[in-house]
Amino acid sequence: MTTTNPTRGQLERNLSQRIQNFYATYLGHRPTKVTCQLFDTKLAIVIENSITQPEQLLINQGQEKLAEQVRSGLDEAIEPQLKQLIEEILDRTVLDLLSDVTLTTERSGIIAVLSDTPSVRNPEAIPKLKKNKTSVIKQETKQEEKQC
């Protein structure tokens, strides 16, 4: 039985769904939309409607600074598990995870810096991937498929 690498789109959809479930499980709040996009060794994640009810309550009471502190604490608390989730799906080490939130739009942004470009069936679909690197990834993918 041969296993083939997923396409870029399949990886991004899987990440989006798993991150949405992760937020529901760990923060008790399911964001309305999670968008993931690979850029060579970077992963951009945009989370819509990411503000939890306690944060929204603080904002409604005019305590934006406290809401920002709460969000910062939440991001710090979930970072190890989020890194692990990304590493599990992409099979790459997350070297750095950068995140920020805009409370007024209820949108969060995360950038994961990866150790290497993830293996996908269609590496040419990854923006910013250099042409010579694309051919190397295609060769690695073919070798991985032969080994399976």
Image (cartoon, rainbow, N blue to C red):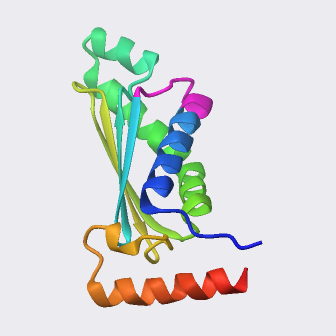
Looking at this view, is 28 or 4 the one in front? 4
User: Is residue 8 left or right of 126 when viewed as pictured?
Assistant: right
Q: What stretch is highlighted in magenta?
A: 24-32
Q: Quadrant of residue 147?
A: bottom right
The location of residue 94, given as percent across then percent down, is: 49, 66
Q: In this view, does 87 lie above or below 78?
A: below
The magenta stretch spans residue 51? no
Q: Is residue 29 magenta?
A: yes
Q: In this picture, is 66 found above or below 133? A: above
Left or right for 145, reference 125: right
Which residue extends farthest front?
1
Residue occupying the point 43% across, 55% down? 9
Nearer to me, 143 or 66: 143
Residue 132 x %, y % = 31, 90
* Quadrant into which the N terminus falls: bottom right
Pick whichever, 87 or 75, lies toward us. Answer: 87
Please say if 31 is above or below 139.
above
